Image (cartoon, rainbow, N blue to C red):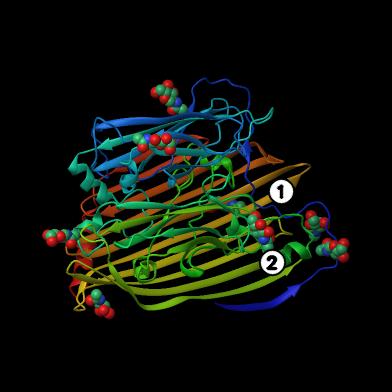
Amino acid sequence: MTRVLFISSIFLSLLSLSSSQPHHFLSHHRRRSPPSSPLPKESVEVSLPLRTSGLPPPPSECTLSPLRHSFGNTIGQPPVTVRYSPPLNCPPPWSYVVLHLGGSIDGEQYDRIAAIWLSGAEILRTSTPEPAEESGTFWNVRKDVTRYSSLLQQPNGTLSMMLENLVNDEFTGVYHVNLTILFYKDEELGIVGKNWGRKLGLGLGFKNAGGDDEKQKPADLVIPVIDEGKNGLWFRIENESHVGSKRIQIPMNAKRIMLEMYVSFHGDDEFWYSNPPNSYIEANNLTTTRGNGAFREVFVKIDGNIVASEVPFPVVFTGGINPLFWEPVVAIGAFDLPSYEFDLTPFLGFLLDGESHSFELGVANAIQFWLVDANLHVWLDKNSSKVEAGVGSFKLPEFQESWEYNFLLLDGSFKVEAERKSQSSGWVSYGCLNLTTSIVKRMKLKNSITFKKNGTYKIVKQHTTVKMEVKVASSTGSLVSWRTLKRKYPLTLITSTLAVGDVNLMTTNFSHALCLKEKSSTPQGKFFRSIHNSQESGGSMLVKGHSVISGVAETQQTLSYRGDPSCFSRNVYASGGKLVTDDSTSVCPSLFHEGRFQTFGRKEII
Ligand SMILES: *[C@@H]1O[C@H](CO)[C@@H](O)[C@H](O)[C@H]1NC(C)=O
Ligand SMILES: *[C@@H]1O[C@H](CO)[C@@H](O)[C@H](O)[C@H]1NC(C)=O
Ligand SMILES: *[C@@H]1O[C@H](CO)[C@@H](O)[C@H](O)[C@H]1NC(C)=O
Ligand SMILES: *[C@@H]1O[C@H](CO)[C@@H](O)[C@H](O)[C@H]1NC(C)=O
Ligand SMILES: *[C@@H]1O[C@H](CO)[C@@H](O)[C@H](O)[C@H]1NC(C)=O
Ligand SMILES: *[C@@H]1O[C@H](CO)[C@@H](O)[C@H](O)[C@H]1NC(C)=O
Ligand SMILES: *[C@@H]1O[C@H](CO)[C@@H](O)[C@H](O)[C@H]1NC(C)=O
Ligand SMILES: *[C@@H]1O[C@H](CO)[C@@H](O)[C@H](O)[C@H]1NC(C)=O
């Protein structure tokens, strides 16, 4: 690990600073006026539909409603757990399984983080809307959970949900939640499901994974990497040295293994990408605890060695930055936080020794607090009791970070650049196959935070790029499959604060996007998809303490998906808490078919 430090100049001031300080982005909640309109409003996350054709899914074969609960004052309490068994009237296998969470809230309340676990494996990380002014709010989250089929078909399992809420005289909102699971047997839908790419699908590997057709199926085993203490099933990470760990023995006939990680950030790290360094906070005698600079990275270690890492996509909760931005359209990923996938198949050579190994999760530079856990998806060679595997060339992730901090009193600029490269390869031999998986991954991050006008004008810019390539080759060296993935998350946040007595007028522009491009070539065919999901918000609000007294806001969102065989795009514009326009189409631009896809085809032949 290399750390390069540049400090071109630091001006420390001897002037004293008392009460007021530059404004950081706090979670706010909307102060409600007395009820007048009886109709609750729907809060929505604009995401890909379950079918990109835009058609509603056909009726499900059967449904289960395993949990219905009201989350009142649940802070510090263990998750709500019920028994789960698969539906008797439509036994597995299913082509497609959807989890539907329906919720409602009335009263005054902050947004809350929540998660659902099936027999200990997390299947959804979600956050709640804040109740709309006057009327209350309801919302719906639908997620493809087919990948958890091995747990869904197990009788006598458990289903747990955690949503820590605080109810008192001031914050009266109780979250009412219904969970339904819909099971489909329609093969056609399964195929469509594969093509639209599994929700936001930030990872690689659950589709067209190469080698043999078996690998496109959900894993045979899903093993949770969770906290078995009393603070919920997720690890609550409070600092960099704190890692969540679990010892796990991988079955000797594992032929493929993926780690899927769930993560969310809260408290002093809710807006980690806008946190200034501690030197600035100390020099100005600020009382804020939102510091430690703006670089964070979640890492995965096996037996103490780092094997994977990820800079998470900055999900903004409904009370974040300006809560009025997120009414009724919430921020990207707020109701269905992306999970991150790491192909650990190259490490099977270490793991298949009949011993248990320690899987550890942690966050570089973390301050309180992060909620992290993971699932190991394991595919087995059912023909044998032992798979042979070996580790090939392996380079420990190389990490470079540089920073440049420049400030005078409350004004200044803070720049961080980080880059990580990793490379791993390993072979797995089963049946008459001997497949070598090689993975190259590169992450780049640039972050800059600028304070102007005596700390009252703050500009945050962040750009993260991840590139990954996975190749599977046979023992003769010929390429069996390859996949490439590129992800980008640009973010810009500009806030100007004007203090008027004990009230602050905050004017903010915020834009961010999640862009993804994936290509693959396997014996089953070629696959391409791209997702571009961006939001631009602007507005202002009057804030007293943590409460928003009044304000105006607008949000524009564009979501476009291009893949084979379908396309989908949706444009929404919300202003003053209402959806003003909402257009969607599933027509593919002809350019895509004639131009881009062919370019991709040509590239593969080379
Ligand atoms: C911070 O506090 C120290 C000790 O009270 C004081 O000497 C210094 O001038 C203060 N700095 C600023 C920028 O207010
Ligand atoms: C800058 O802000 C500090 C703290 O709010 C205040 O004490 C100081 O007077 C301000 N300086 C100017 C030039 O406005
Ligand atoms: C939960 O389901 C019940 C029964 O279908 C329904 O009456 C109620 O409105 C639902 N609540 C929410 C929050 O979706
Ligand atoms: C289901 O689990 C419970 C508690 O773990 C156990 O007592 C019961 O015997 C199990 N039932 C079956 C059919 O496995
Ligand atoms: C880090 O957090 C853990 C868990 O909260 C705590 O036990 C430990 O003392 C902390 N370490 C440091 C260096 O603060
Ligand atoms: C399992 O063994 C059978 C019989 O030897 C063979 O036909 C089949 O292809 C094997 N399956 C796999 C996945 O290797
Ligand atoms: C599989 O292939 C790798 C690399 O080509 C080789 O080192 C290894 O010995 C092979 N394993 C078996 C069991 O043939
Ligand atoms: C936000 O964007 C609008 C329109 O581009 C611009 O007029 C305004 O000055 C911006 N506000 C801030 C705080 O940058």
Q: Nearer the viewer, residue 170 or 365?
A: 365
Horizontal side, residue 231 vs residue 549: left or right = left
Alpha carbon of mark 2 to alpha carbon of mark 1: how far?
18 Å
Query: Looking at the figure, which quarter contains the C terminus?
Result: bottom left
Relative depth, front residue between 396 and 132? 396
Q: Is residue 485 above or below residue 582?
A: below
Q: Position of residue 331 (x, y in %)?
A: 48, 46
Mark on residue 18? none
Is residue 282 visible to us here? yes
User: Residue 498, which numbered label?
Assistant: 1
Residue 424: where, in percent of width, then height?
38, 74
In the picture, measured across the screen, residue 394 lies left or right of residue 284, that is left
Amino acid found under the numbered disc labelled 2 = Gly
- Residue 389: x, y in percent? 30, 71
Neighbourhood count class around disc 2 (C-alpha, 10 Å): few under 14, some 14–19, many 20 upward: many
Give me the residue at 55% from left, 71% from top: 417
Q: Where is mark 2, residue-wise?
A: 412
